Image (spheres, coloured by chain):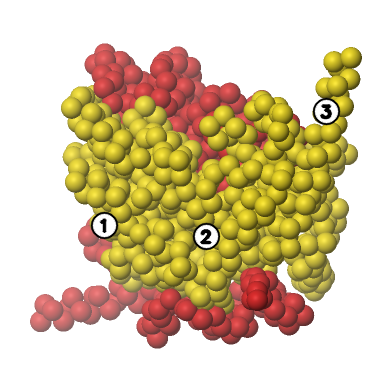
Chain colours: A yellow, B red
Amino acid sequence: MRSREETLDPRDWNKFRGLAHQMLDDILTYQQTVRRRPVWRPVPKRVERKFEARLPLKGQSESEVYREFKRFILPYPLGNIHPRFWGWVMGNGTPLGSLSEMLAAGMNPNLGGGNHVANLVERQVIDWLREMLGYSEKASGLLVSGGSMANLTGLAVARNSKAGYDVREKGLSGRRRRMVLYGSAEMHSSLTRAVELLGLGRDALRCIPVDDAYRVDVDKLRTSVESDLKSGKKPICVIGTAGSTNTGSIDPLKELADVASEYNLWFHVDGAFGAFAYLPRKLRHLVKGMECADSIAFDLHKWGYLPFEVGCILVRDAEAHRSAFAMDARYLKHGTRGTAGDPVWFSDYGVQLTRGFRALKVWMALKAYGVRKLSALVQQNVEQASYLAELIRKSDDLELMAPVALNVVCFRFMKSGFDNAQLNSLNEELLVSLQESGIAVLSGTDLQGRYAMRCAITNHRSIRNDFDLLVSEIEREGNLLQEKRAIVSAGSKV
Amino acid sequence: MRSREETLDPRDWNKFRGLAHQMLDDILTYQQTVRRRPVWRPVPKRVERKFEARLPLKGQSESEVYREFKRFILPYPLGNIHPRFWGWVMGNGTPLGSLSEMLAAGMNPNLGGGNHVANLVERQVIDWLREMLGYSEKASGLLVSGGSMANLTGLAVARNSKAGYDVREKGLSGRRRRMVLYGSAEMHSSLTRAVELLGLGRDALRCIPVDDAYRVDVDKLRTSVESDLKSGKKPICVIGTAGSTNTGSIDPLKELADVASEYNLWFHVDGAFGAFAYLPRKLRHLVKGMECADSIAFDLHKWGYLPFEVGCILVRDAEAHRSAFAMDARYLKHGTRGTAGDPVWFSDYGVQLTRGFRALKVWMALKAYGVRKLSALVQQNVEQASYLAELIRKSDDLELMAPVALNVVCFRFMKSGFDNAQLNSLNEELLVSLQESGIAVLSGTDLQGRYAMRCAITNHRSIRNDFDLLVSEIEREGNLLQEKRAIVSAGSKV
């Protein structure tokens, strides 16, 4: 006698369908009404404890699981879908994006390779992204989880292309001429991580000082390359930052391209969000020279506003890209007919062999919005940054702490009579108060020993009024905190 | 005068909501009725051409975009959601999984770190997965895109822990003692890729021969380690395969653990799908010794049946894990209060800084099914593999080509009088015919020079009848092809 076969499909499709429509309604309403809620609130202890339960042996009904989701998960988001979230650099996501994810997971193709339409969608998306950024038509590309993977992929190709021998086979041990790379002191930590992972060693990544506008000092870069050459090192790559995390500064990319070409270095651009400055005609000049890059890394889930995760790496020399990753496994034979029948396999261009259908959300977004609307939104965010900078300049209590090159505004609450250490601690507390109030989320950073609040605007939901509110709340709360401290300080002196 | 502010939110939420419910209904029906459709069909040329259009400047309405999706994308899947897809090793995904993805993207948190509930969900999921696989309670873990990233992460920790100096800082160049690693000739290509990426060089990865059951030969492993030690190499890691891609074979993990412990090597287990053999009590002995591993890599989107992408890496020594990746960037200060207020940041445990909410689909699945149901399904797939093997043994036309250790069945169509080359070509054609018929998708591989059809069963929708149909169709089609060839061959002799 055979037992009934199990499956993970719903026992009762109609009932499941009802629940699914409820989920959909809830999540749309959640997005539609986000402005009415606090940006962020801490997870209460009693909720925290809900996530300490042991591994479930027996299942619950899907509707019970969903009830728990609604009660304990949905109310405690990070907040980045909110119009007044400007912390770190994150996109909001879009309602269409969440539906794309549902459709993608419903079809659930594996974009490692093969003859099926999802691969064509990704290929088209790569074509579009290349065109969107004015990059070489012959470049290869790959959608990845985000900027960290994009940078790792780009630097892997750089290492393997410039080593002068078969690094994949021989590795780096025993080589006496050490490969070295160059970036600015403001480059992103993921580049350091990539260099470490690739076995090149953090020591081999030169952090070249920046000018007052936080752009790499090209003269100092040249000096560093020359000095490495003299001491027998092997310079292989220069990294340009388009949109630094701290201040949004953009390196002089054309000049970097010239240095790269002069010394035969790979030129990698980390344009995680800044690459999008290419979109609006008014801003395009800021990233002049990006088109000369050997590889460009950027995110779609930051200034492309799409839900996590999706980033992209483009590589000018498609063959260099492929030969850094292509494998030849017996069970991965690429055919000409049948399901495996497609000459180009994405799994030959990056770390992942199994790859999900992240291309779909990009495809739907680019078709539904068109590049013009994306461009208008990027422009809008940059204007909002200028607007905020203007409010800060006009304020008696606030001080702008770095030039606003793009969409990042660094500033602090300022009171005369406070020394730098006091200001640092006051602003750090102010940032947290603001977050806890639920009014806005900014993040903090350190600019030459001074604590700065950082407002990074990659938000399609923000409107100008949001920045008015931000400034007035910071002024109000800053003065409150400052008075409180003055009282405490006066008290302690008694 | 200020222009109206743009957003990517729907202009008309009610209309959008209507479209969204349509999408949901369609994708549920798509999953519900999958059995009625062919497993796979090639993408027609006219559809291919649809994906050659240039970058859209102006947007279309969301409903138009969706119409194109429905017409040109939805009908041409890879096929792995179908009950008779057994190609390579892929899960089906589940209806609940696609909804989890929608909810995750709707909330759109970034699980790099910080105080928000999604991080607690991932932490709980990691706890559960550890418990599910009988692994150390103190181990750290991270959800990643899949097995390739999990293997890369595990080997990165191995390299950094065993090098004996600060690899992150110093890199590998100039070191005379080359680090070497060991795995079987049947290990997965992603391990080779990881070793290459880490700068260790493919040369440093010893591919130890396997026995007749495709399990690593432990004596030969020992000899290889000894020989490397004698010649001044630095053995750092032994890799055990739990579930080889070709045949599903499982290395003698306990013996490997002993070798690792004897020579002070890191013991990494690649259990991409095979780790799940731990679930059913009846199969648990197969992966005895996995609990001794220093790191275990496995996928949830294979034998966990979840939609792409989700895999996991577990590391016994949490501090070794953290110190292989943790960064100290100014803009990533981990606070004690506010949005950044959480001591443990997932971004300190892997390559990605920005991390999506893939934890949600795992959480919902484990709660809704419970580990018992997952276990029953794994057991069911293994029994289906035995059942298929039995059908093959009974068939006059088919030949089993490797022992069936788990859920992978390698076999071929066999006719006396055909030499090996003829059989290879016949079976290769048979595999494609079967795919093109839409009846089943298997993939092919090479076993010691003989072409094998590979049936890898990680499918929660398959029932026994599907395997009956597979065998009868292969017999029918194989005989047809063979007769056709005989006629052609006879004709050519005239």
State which chain disc 1 sits on. Answer: A
Q: Position of residue A364 (x, y in %)?
A: 55, 73
Residue B2 is left or right of residue B407, and the answer is: right
State which chain disc 3 sits on. Answer: A
Q: Which residue is identified by label 1? A: A317
Q: Which mark is residue A300?
A: 2
Q: As rendered, which of B399 and A6 lies closer to the eye? A: A6
Above or below, B4 against A192 in this view is: below
Label 1: how many Cα within 10 Å (few below 14, some 14–19, many 20+): some
Which residue sits at x=43%, y=76%?
B55
Q: Is the C-beta separation of discs 2 and 1 under 8 Å?
A: no
Which residue sits at x=67%, y=26%?
A419
Label 2: how many Cα within 10 Å (few below 14, some 14–19, many 20+): many
Is residue A241 visible in the rendered structure shown here? yes
Above or below, B35 against A180 in this view is: below
Q: Which residue is identified by label 3? A: A486
- Location of residue A126 (image quadrant): bottom left
Q: Is the C-beta separation of discs 3 and 2 under 8 Å?
A: no
